Amino acid sequence: MPIYEYQCRRCKKQFQSLVMKKEEEKKVFCPECESRDLKRLISRVIYHVSESDRLATFDPNVSKGDSFLKDSRNIGLAAKKRAQQLGADLGSSFEEKLEKLRTDPGSVIRDSE
Ligand SMILES: [Zn+2]
């Protein structure tokens, strides 16, 4: 389901809207000033790509740009891809660690102290 993020050109408010059909996009208006002069923020759509999709399109042999490396959701993706290719099960503790690392990178350092 595509959820798009918009920014109003008039008052600069950012908001999200669920757009089922292309025609519906014309009906989207700013909740703040009701302006229809909107800019769609493309970046947020990528946020809704599931991890399995990220994993499927992830190629460890292609060098990654800055934005990839700064995105904490990509932490551990290379390890997961490798395991997937080998048919290995990393287990739930790996998933847990990964989740922790992605949501709170500092906690891992704190735990090992
Ligand atoms: Zn507005």
Image: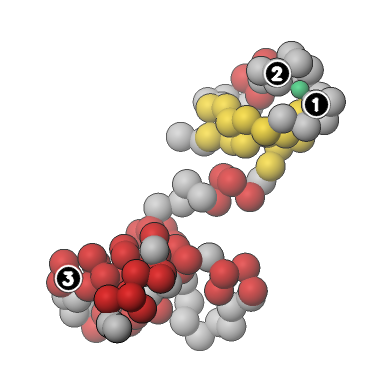
Tell me, for residue 67, which label it has, or none.
Answer: none
Q: Are marks 2 and 1 in contact (CB under 8 Å)?
A: yes
Task: Give x and y (percent) for residue 51.
Answer: 38, 58
- Mark found first going from the N terminus, 2 or 1: 1
How dense is the environment of label 2, judged by Cα within 10 Å: few (below 14), some, or many (20 and up)?
A: few
- Mark found first going from the N terminus, 1 or 3: 1
Q: Is residue 29 above or below residue 8?
A: above
Residue 92 visible to an observer of this rendering: yes
Q: Is residue 36 left or right of residue 4?
A: right
Q: Is residue 69 above or below residue 25?
A: below
Quarter of the image for residue 5 reads top right
Q: CA distance from mark 1 to mark 3?
A: 46 Å
Residue 38 visible to an observer of this rendering: no
Tell me, for residue 32, which label it has, or none.
Answer: 2
Q: Which residue is mark 1?
A: 11
Task: Give x and y (percent) for residue 99.
Answer: 31, 63
Q: Quadrant of the C terminus?
A: bottom left
Q: Is residue 111 left or right of residue 64?
A: left
Q: Is residue 49 left or right of residue 34?
A: left
Q: Is mark 1 within 8 Å of ligand 1?
A: yes
Say which element carries label 3: helix
Of residue 21 and residue 68, the one placed in the foreground of this image is: 68
Q: Is mark 2 within 8 Å of ligand 1?
A: yes
Determine the quadrant in which ligand 1 lies: top right
Identified at 59% across, 83% down, the residue is 63
Q: Is residue 12 above or below residue 108?
A: above
Say which element carries label 1: loop
Q: CA distance from mark 2 to mark 1?
A: 8 Å
Identified at 53% across, 65% down, the residue is 71
How dense is the environment of label 3, judged by Cα within 10 Å: few (below 14), some, or many (20 and up)?
A: few
Q: Which residue is mark 3?
A: 93
